[in-house]
Image (spheres, rainbow, N blue to C red):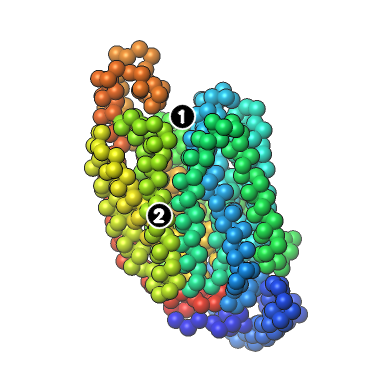
Amino acid sequence: MAEPSSPAASAASRPSAAPHTAPSEAPTAAQPLATSGAAAAQSASSRSATAAQSASCAAPTAVESPSDRPATAAQSPVSHGLHGRALALVFFGLLLAMFISSLSETIASTALPTIVGDLNGVEIMQWVSTAYILTSTLTMPVYGKLGDLIGRKRLLMTALGLYAAGKVLCGLAVNMEMLIGGRLVSGLGGGGLIILSQAALSDVVPPRKLGTYMGIIGAVFAVSNVLGPVMGGWFVQVTGWRGIFWFTVPVALLAVVVLGFTLPKDEKPFGRTPLDWPGMMAMTVAVTSLVLAMAWGGTLVPWGSLPFMGLVALAVGSAVVFVLIERRAAEPIIPLGLFRNRNFVLCSATGLLLNISFMGALNYLPTYFQIVDNLAPEVAGLVCTATSAGILITSTATGWIASKTGRYKPMLIAMCVVSAAGLFLLSRLEVHTALWVPVLYLFVLGFGMGLGMQLLVLVVQNEFPHVMVGTATAANNFFRQIGASVGTALVGALFTMRLTADVAASISHVDNLSLATLTPQVVDKLPTATQMVIAQGYSDALLPLFLWFVPLMLACLIMMLFLKNHSLATTINHGGAGRES
């Protein structure tokens, strides 16, 4: 695969997003980063890019539909990226943004029972998580598209500001409504933190070197998953639960300061950008209906009931309308042309199935260990960190290997095989198994997931021209988020249904006891015989579900076998491996 040797070459090779302008109106190169020498080099690059663009006007070009056009470049980073101290500072700021986004969910999970108890809102507790999932999922594709159109710096700082504002509201909450409102606001910002950070990193690091940084990002996610429950428990016991929300505010503000001084300046003003408002509205209805159906199904409304089926029908209908709108939109939120790229489709489908399996498997294990193995909450949380340890090791190693060799397909295939083995092993656990056994099995699962989760993002970013990297990254992560929502809801519904069938009749003789009130604290106070019945019921209801996820991993394996291992671009302003192959 031949890589464009300069921004000029890539500008000449990629299709135009709009009618050509006069040379004086052509997009300029990235703003000077440090020295006057760098400024001179970028100025020369800008002049050559303008000349190349003018020359390309004379050549006939194929007519494209609006949904196939890449976004107009908002900024043209230096061809070979940042280096040294400048890159380290940018990467530090981006890691801060991704760290607090990943930490946001795990740090609050252990404190949620205490929070809703203080605010007297157990009956609407589910909205605390649903609110964040809803707004963050909705804003992902919007942030990705706008980042390609107007640049990522202002958007990322705005997202950090919204995230911090939402946390302030949560910290000041005097009732559940205010807490949920704060979660909605923080989700509006949180939906852009990981998307924009990953895309902004691709503005300063070429794909061939990006693997190493993606591996470090995977390690940061693993560390946040370990620290989150521990920090959440510490805040509850030492400072009170409000400290959980206040803690992330100064971290977000620090990220704003660092990125404000280090990220290259956005060049295109917001006012000149056409926005796909009809597409946004259709996507909002579709995603909201789907998320609510997954969150409420089997809990607030029965599966198969009229309200549930109505939400599903609304989601499907709105999705169809969204596709019709995107086919004609000047700047579609999710260009349909993305789905003509084989690697994008394979990576997005694999990410969706991986998240269904991974999130579905992990969400109920802490409670499982408390009830079945009679572990204390902090010990149950530490057992689950074995997964993060596996991810930490392999994500760092595979990112480095991808950067050094340019090959990623073997690691993605291995990810599916090892993850399938981890899920199969978890399905074989038994009541009161020795503690080292689930620790080992969870480590195997994390080891497998870490082999390729971050590489999927790298593959997608390498497939398309740099001017589309934000849109492609956001679309890929959008499907991952949908997978996480579906996996969590699916396992929750199936687990509850199986547990009801196995245990409900056995505990009916115990006064004032129902599955709705079956917490680890309640189980500890029950007679030993009843505890054994509940423990066996929990095991029989949950563990076989892990075996059901193995076919999903095998489906991922088949898809990864069809993946094309395109060469990783060595420049930032590349034309996209998918177009050049």
Residue 193, percent from left and from top: 59, 53
SS for tag 1? loop
Asked if residue 213 lies left or right of residue 263, the reply is: left
Q: Residues within 10 Å of mark 1 (few under 14, many from 20)?
A: few
Residue 63: tell me if it is visible: no
Q: Nearer the viewer, residue 496 or 414?
A: 414
Residue 260: tell me if it is visible: yes
> What residue is disc 2 on?
391
Asked if residue 143 lies left or right of residue 397, the reply is: right
Nearer the observer: mark 1 or 2; the answer is: 2
Quarter of the picture holding the N terminus? bottom left
Name the residue: 68% across, 67% down: 264
Q: Residues within 10 Å of mark 2 (few under 14, many from 20)?
A: many
271 up-or-down from 48: above or below: above
Quarter of the picture holding the C terminus? bottom left
Q: Earlier in the sequence, mark 1 or mark 2?
A: 1
> What residue is disc 1 on?
300
C-alpha distance separating marks 1 and 2: 35 Å
